Image (spheres, helix red, strand yellow):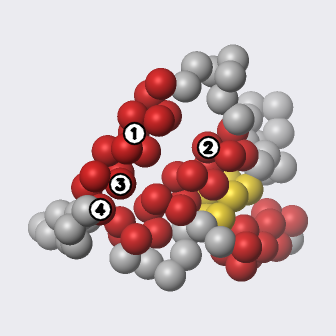
């Protein structure tokens, strides 16, 4: 199986993301901003045109924050969530 880090520098981007998320505490984490950061980092690492992440919780698993790697991806995610 091919590594998801198929271009130079992408492993460094992914490692930096993991370090940023690892340093955050639950009390200080801005979830929508963190999700957007994940999307923007994973897009080139995975080699895809866009990434959408939706989060939910036990109280409301559907209407949590939606983030995308760009405005179009985020819009698609919101449309799918609201459908």
Query: Which element is circle 1 on?
Result: helix
Q: Distance between the residues labelled 2 and 4?
A: 18 Å
Disc nearest the viewer among 3 and 1: 3
Q: Which residue lies furthest to the right in this view?
A: 82
Contact flag, marks 3 and 1 (Cβ < 8 Å) = no
What residue is shown at x 32% (from left), y 44% (from top)? 15
**Location of residue 75 by image quarter:** bottom right
First-in-chain label (3 vs 1): 3
Disc nearest the viewer among 3 and 2: 3
Instruction: State the image coordinates of residue 7 (x, y, percent, origin top left).
Output: 22, 72
Instruction: State the image coordinates of residue 17 (x, y, percent, origin top left).
Output: 43, 45
In terms of depth relative to the viewer, which is nearer, 22 or 53? 22
Badge 2: residue crowd in 10 Å (few <14, some 14–19, many ≥20): some
| 18 vs 62: above or below | above
Badge 3: residue crowd in 10 Å (few <14, some 14–19, many ≥20): some
Q: Distance between the residues labelled 3 and 2?
A: 14 Å
What residue is shown at x 50% (from left), y 82% (from top)? 49
Label at residue 34: 2
Q: Distance between the residues labelled 3 and 4?
A: 5 Å
Residue identifier under label 3 = 13
**Location of residue 56 by image quarter:** top right
Q: How far apart are marks 3 and 1 (CA)?
A: 9 Å
Residue identifier under label 1 = 18
Residue identifier under label 4 = 10
Query: Which element is circle 2 on?
Result: helix
Contact flag, marks 3 and 4 (Cβ < 8 Å) = yes
Query: Which element is circle 4 on?
Result: helix
First-in-chain label (2 vs 4): 4
Which quarter shows the C terminus? bottom right
Query: Which element is circle 3 on?
Result: helix
Q: How many marks can you see?
A: 4
């Amino acid at each position: 199986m091919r590594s998801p880090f198929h271009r130079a520098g992408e492993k460094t981007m992914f490692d930096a993301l993991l370090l940023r998320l690892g340093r955050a505490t639950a009390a200080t984490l801005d979830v929508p901003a963190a999700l957007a950061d994940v999307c923007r980092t994973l897009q080139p690492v995975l080699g895809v045109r866009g990434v959408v992440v939706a989060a939910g919780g036990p109280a409301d698993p559907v209407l949590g924050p939606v983030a995308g790697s760009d405005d179009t991806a985020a819009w698609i995610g919101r449309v799918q969530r609201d459908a």
